[in-house]
Image (cartoon, rainbow, N blue to C red):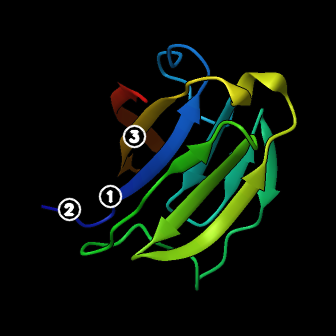
């Protein structure tokens, strides 16, 4: 149930090695993340700007995340439509990667926000 005034952020991504606790994939070196607002981050740098059209943080959406280590490419489909292909330059993206999904509920109370992260990780 979504309470009035609350927001939910979803992020899928890949990391080299184990994901860092309480860090979003894409916000630190050797990681990439696709945020539910459409933004893509690689190694802490915003690569793709979000848009209303690319916003996939809604119910009944299927989000994917995959990689081709030989080509050092990471791809993100939404509802079977490829929306982003990212060419990762560093050699670390040519190794096996860990898949990470983060659900973050942002509870808004007056002027402060409380973040409640939930992290799921799977080695590929």
Q: Residue at x 58, y 27 (%)?
A: 15
Distance from the alpha carbon under mark 2 to that under mark 1 = 6 Å
State the mark number for residue 6.
1
- Label 2–label 3 contact, CB within 8 A: no
54 vs 114, nearest the viewer? 54
Residue, far bottom: 53
Q: Residue at x 41, y 66 (%)?
A: 57
Q: Secondary structure at mark 1?
A: loop
Distance from the alpha carbon under mark 1 to that under mark 3 = 20 Å
State which tag comes first along the sequence, 1 or 3.
1
Left or right placement of residue 1 versus residue 54 in this view: left
Residue 8 lies in quadrant:
bottom left
Q: Secondary structure at mark 3?
A: strand
Q: Which residue is mark 3?
A: 101
Which mark's residue is nearer the viewer, 2 or 3? 3
Residue 12 visible, this angle: yes
Give the x, y percent position of residue 56. Answer: 45, 71
Residue, far right: 89
State the mark number for residue 3.
2
């Amino acid at each position: 149930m979504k309470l009035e005034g609350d927001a939910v952020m979803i992020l899928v991504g890949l990391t080299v090695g184990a994901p860092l606790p309480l860090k979003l994939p894409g916000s630190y070196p050797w990681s990439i993340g696709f945020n539910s607002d459409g933004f893509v981050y690689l190694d802490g740098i915003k690569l793709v700007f979000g848009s209303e059209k690319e916003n996939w943080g809604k119910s009944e959406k299927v989000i994917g995340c995959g990689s081709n280590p030989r080509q050092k490419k990471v791809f993100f489909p939404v509802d079977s439509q490829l929306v982003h292909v990212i060419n990762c330059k560093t050699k670390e993206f040519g190794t096996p990667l860990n898949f990470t999904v983060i659900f973050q509920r942002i509870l808004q109370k007056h002027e402060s926000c409380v973040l409640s992260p939930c992290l799921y990780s799977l080695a590929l």
